[in-house]
């Protein structure tokens, strides 16, 4: 069952959540975002305890842009292999509310079915389960 939606002031985050946000902020400094000028960073913690980062990478052919969240998830897959499971993802963007896009929700739902998603919403940090954010993800029948 989906967990209750919840927002919390950032000073109520656990130490490991804070660490993940710091990693997301570090990643945002590497963003390649000359078109939108919105630098986004993401950091995932896996069930095995690994931490992996990603930033958004834009392109002159706009549709090729890759979000910070997916780049972080893909870095985790590269490091831990196909059995990877995302436990938490933190998203950081300066002075913005950034809730993950639909494509990133779909990817997270498959690689972290119980993932907690932490993202900035105004002055607060919103904590939701991926099930709250995407209740009925696409799945290929007969597959995971
Ligand atoms: N972006 C992300 O990296 N993550 C999100 O959750 C939303 C949007 C990026 C894509 C693009 O480079 C820029 O933000 C503006 O859409």
Image: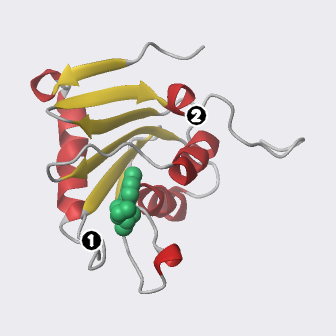
x and y, in percent, of residue 11 in the image: 9, 25
Depth check: give the residue in front, 4 or 95.
Answer: 95
Q: In which quadrant of the rendered image does the C terminus lie?
A: top right
Q: Is residue 27 above or below residue 142?
A: below
x and y, in percent, of residue 73 in the image: 48, 55
Residue named by callout 1: 31
Spatial CA span between label 2 and label 1: 26 Å
Kindly identify the residue that appears in the image at 39 percent across and 76 percent down.
Answer: 58
Q: In which quadrant of the rendered image does the N terminus lie?
A: top right
Does the residue at mark 2 contact the one at mark 1 (Cβ under 8 Å)?
no
Q: Is residue 25 above or below residue 20?
A: below
* Callout 2 crowding tier (Cα within 10 Å): few <14, some 14–19, many ≥20: some
Residue named by callout 2: 134
Q: Reading the chain from its start, which is encountered first: label 2 or label 1? A: 1
x and y, in percent, of residue 78 in the image: 52, 65
x and y, in percent, of residue 12 in the image: 15, 21
Mark 1 Cβ and ligand 1 under 8 Å apart: yes
User: Does any portion of residue 53 appear in the rendered image?
Assistant: yes
């Amino acid at each position: 069952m989906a967990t209750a939606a919840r927002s919390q002031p950032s000073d109520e985050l656990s130490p490991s959540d804070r660490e993940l946000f710091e990693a997301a902020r570090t990643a945002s400094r590497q963003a390649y975002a000359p078109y939108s000028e919105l630098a986004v960073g993401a950091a995932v913690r896996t069930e095995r305890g690994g931490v992996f980062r990603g930033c958004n990478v834009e392109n002159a052919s706009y549709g090729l842009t890759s979000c910070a969240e997916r780049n972080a998830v893909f870095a985790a897959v590269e490091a831990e292999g196909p059995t990877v499971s995302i436990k938490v993802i933190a998203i950081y963007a300066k002075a913005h509310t950034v809730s993950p896009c639909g494509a990133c929700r779909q990817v997270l739902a498959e690689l972290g079915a119980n993932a907690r998603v932490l993202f900035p919403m105004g002055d607060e940090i919103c904590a939701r389960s991926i099930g709250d954010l995407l209740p009925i993800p696409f799945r290929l029948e007969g597959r995971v």
